[in-house]
Structure formats: structure tokens, C-alpha cells
Image (spheres, rainbow, N blue to C red):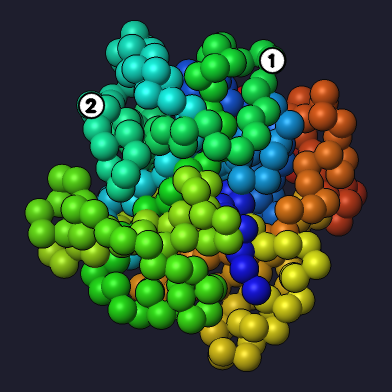
Amino acid sequence: MELHGIHHLTAVTANAPGNLAFYTRILGMRLVKKTVNQDDVSAYHLFYGDGIASPGSDITFFDFRTKPARHGVNSISRTALRVAGEESLLWWAQWFTEHQVPHGEIRPLGGRQTLDFEDPEGTRLRLVDDGGEGAAHPWAESPVPTAHQIRGLGPITLSVPDLVPTERVLTEVLNMRPAGAYTTPNVEGSTTHVFKMGPGGAAAELHVAVELNTPRMHPGAGGVHHVAFRMPDEAYMDWARRLETVRLPSSGPIDRFYFRSLYFREPNGILFELATDGPGFTADESVEELGTHLSLPPFLEHRRAEIEANLKPL
């Protein structure tokens, strides 16, 4: 069994209106689903993706009333977003300067050109040149020119104090393949190890930085909640049985309506999700309507009035 790449990544915001403004007006991504956290319906769950909400294009946010995160190990420490070509990175560097977005310099990292930046709450992000590999689905209403739009999620970076237990889960349970290493930027003595899934490429890599003298991450706004990996719809129960067979504690099957999920923590405590591509975000909205109203899965629809009354306007 193989995973096909990154499915989505979920981070935390304490400012949903500001989050919406940044990811749609500055990053030019489409709000493809406006819904709620199914385990805490007082919180928005906002999904940003490409023009058609392709699996693997979504960075999502829980809107929690919380203090800022403290970055550190035992965490997902950097989220990459793919763009096509170094010319796009140059365009983004200028765009970030114009809009006062904190960012670094364009530099090679792990064999690709990259540009690090942060959102207004300190979420650590990275643009990665993916060489234009794979299909692109631009959003017609994006303020970003079509050629430079974000194409989807790229390599996700974990930070851990000990590689061995995490590597065992990645290779022996999730069937990822070791694919080299590079020096971790801005962390003395740290090496980042690359693991590939399925077809490989920037959309199907997980990077693991080993940091020996870094404090643990403290959750909060600007931090990351979990990362999800793509599994074929038909392999869902096979993966559920696999986690059970290797005695890795998990949530068991959970139906999120837009996809089906399995959750578990790797040995350094980082939350992983395995998620199916289907049914997808058009299960209750047309492509044209995506993100235009509050969507609720059928099992929450009877609580719509209560839920809407407790949500702050965006």
C-alpha cells in the first residue's frame, strides 16, 4: 500500500477574519469550504485551496480562542506551498515586500528553490518551486496572476529531537522512502531528512528536521494542528486494519463527510491523519459555489441555527 502525497494541513488561527483576508487577498488562494470544527462547532474550520479544491491543495485553519504558539520540536514546523518556476518566486518576493509580509531570501533547499515567509500570526510557510510538475487549477478571481498562483501543498517539515522512532513509523508503517538529507537552515547542527510517498515530487514529500537543543513546541495561534496524507478511497479499510495490526493507537474510521479519516500520533507526539480524496468538497456545493456559505455535514444540519448564532462574522 502507498500513500499518494499530502492531502491537507490544518493550522490554528485566533483571528478568522484576518486569516481569511491574508490567505485570499495576499496569497490569492480560494476559500473552498467554510464549515466548523466537527468536534467543537463553536470554531470555524476554513479551507483554502486551488480553483477547484483539488485534494492536496488545501491549507486549513481551526479558529480557536488561544494565545500565540511557541515554535519548537515535536511539531510540524514549516508548511510549503508550491509555485511554478523561479520567476514566480521573484514575483512573490516583490509582492511580499509591497504588502509588508515578513519573508527571507530566495535560496536553494533540498534541491529546489525556496522562499520562506510568515502569515500575520507567525505561521511558518515556504514557497517551493515545483518545476511546474503536475496539473494546475488556478482560481479566476485570485488577485495573483495565473502564472504565479499557489498550485498546492509542497513538502511539510516536522521538527523532532529523535529521528529513529519517527523514521520507523514513516518507513515501516506508512511505506515512505528515505530520499536524502540536507542541512537545516538557521538551526546549528541540525539535519533535515527527506521521505517520499507514492509518485514522489514536491507534492509527495515529508521532511524531518532533527533538532537536539530546541524546546518543545507549545500549541496556539500560528502553530500547526496536524498533517493529512492522501490514501486511495478504496484502500481506506486496508489502512485502518494496518494501523490495528501494528498496534498503533488510532481514532479508528471517522467519516468527515467530505473525506474519510484515520488519526494517530507518531512517537514524537505529532498528529497524523490519513484521508481519502473523496467524496470531496463538491459533495454539498457546486464548484462555482465553493466557500460562499456555511456548509455543515448532514449530521450537524439540524443544529444550523444554533451553530450560526455562535459564530462571529467573517
* Residue at the image position 24 percent from the left and 32 percent from the top: 107
The amino acid type of the residue labelled 2 equals Glu
* Residue at the image position 79 percent from the left and 53 percent from the top: 278
Q: Nearer the viewer, residue 271 or 183?
A: 183
| Quadrant position of residue 4 | bottom right
Image disc number at residue 43: none
* Residue at the image position 56 percent from the left and 90 percent from the top: 247
Image coordinates of residue 14 in percent, x first then y, are 47, 38
Image coordinates of residue 188 in percent, x first then y, are 10, 54
- Circle 2 sits in a helix, a strand or a loop, which is it? loop
Distance from the alpha carbon under mark 2 to that under mark 1: 29 Å
- Give the residue number, with chain letter if any, for mark 1: 140
| Quadrant position of residue 228 | bottom right
Q: Nearer the viewer, residue 177 or 95?
A: 177
The amino acid type of the residue labelled 1 equals Ala
- Give the residue number, with chain letter if any, for mark 2: 105
- Residue found farthest to the top: 98
* Residue at the image position 86 percent from the left and 44 percent from the top: 283
Q: Is residue 150 above or below residue 224?
A: above
Query: Is residue 239 at all visible to an observer of this figure?
Result: yes
Q: Is residue 181 above or below residue 251?
A: above
Specify whether 314 is left or right of 288. left
Query: Is residue 31 at all visible to an observer of this figure?
Result: no
User: How many residues crowd around disc 2 within 10 Å: few (fewer than 14), some, or many (20 or more)?
Assistant: few
On the rendered image, what quadrant is the N terminus found in?
A: bottom right
- Residue found farthest to the left: 188
Specify whether 310 is left or right of 306. left
Query: Which of the two labelled residues, at mark 2 and mark 1, occupies the earlier sequence position?
Result: 2
Q: Is residue 21 above or below residue 224?
A: above
Image coordinates of residue 77 in percent, x first then y, are 34, 51
